[in-house]
Amino acid sequence: MTQAAARHILVEAEVFCEELKNRIDSGEDFGEVAKEFSSCPSSEKGGDLGVFGPGQMVKEFDEVVFSASINEVQGPIKTQFGFHLIEVTSRTE
């Protein structure tokens, strides 16, 4: 079964999510940005969500995690929880 590992940053506003993506694209560390700004409890671990399979996350999140390039920040992705930046750190088929 396909499995993926990812980390994410969750915020309420799309504009703020875009600002954080620009900071990461400019060289700031994803994990440090997650620790400072993400509203998800995973922020304590730099946004790390661990390993999971398809269907364990909300649909919009799953679609990105199981199709995006590895180690490339994706987003903003809107879900029922807010706006996410997502980085897939590994995936196995």
Image (spheres, rainbow, N blue to C red):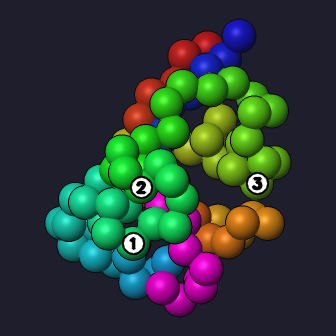
Asked whether 59 falls inside the magenta stretch, the response is no
* Mark 1 burial class by Cα count in 10 Å: few <14, some 14-19, many 20+: some
Q: How far apart are labels 3 and 1 at the CA level? A: 21 Å
* Among numbered discs 2 and 3, the one appearing first in the sequence: 2
* Outermost residue toward the left in this view: 27
Q: Quadrant of residue 66?
A: top right
Quadrant, the N terminus: top right
Q: Which mark is residue 6?
A: none
Secondary structure of the residue carrying numbered label 3: helix
Residue type at the position of mark 1: Phe
Amino acid type shown at disc 2: Ser
Residue 83 visible, this orientation: yes
Please tell me the numbered disc located at residue 60: 3
Residue 91 screen position, x and y as percent: 52, 24
- Which sits in the foreground, 43 or 56? 43
Q: Is residue 25 above or below residue 31?
A: below
Residue at 18 percent across and 66 percent down: it is: 27
Q: Estimate the spatial distance between the alpha carbons at disc 1 and disc 2, rounded to whole Å.
A: 8 Å
Q: Do tag 2 and tag 3 residues touch (Cβ < 8 Å)?
A: no
Q: Residue 37, which numbered label?
A: 1
Instruction: Work out whether mark 1 precedes mark 2 in sequence or the reverse, and give the earlier one.
Output: 1
Residue at point 41% right, 35% down?
Answer: 89
Residue 14 is situated, as x and y percent measured from the top left of the image, at 59, 83
Q: Marks 2 and 3, how far apart in space? A: 20 Å
Q: Is residue 12 magenta?
A: yes
Tag 2 residue: 43
**Mark 2 Cα-neighbour bin, 10 Å: few <14, some 14–19, many ≥20:** many
Q: Which residues are magenta?
A: 8-16
**Disc 1 + disc 2, Cβ < 8 Å:** yes
Q: Give how far across and how far down residue 34 sits, in percent.
A: 37, 61
The reply to whether dot 3 and dot 1 touch (C-beta < 8 Å) is no
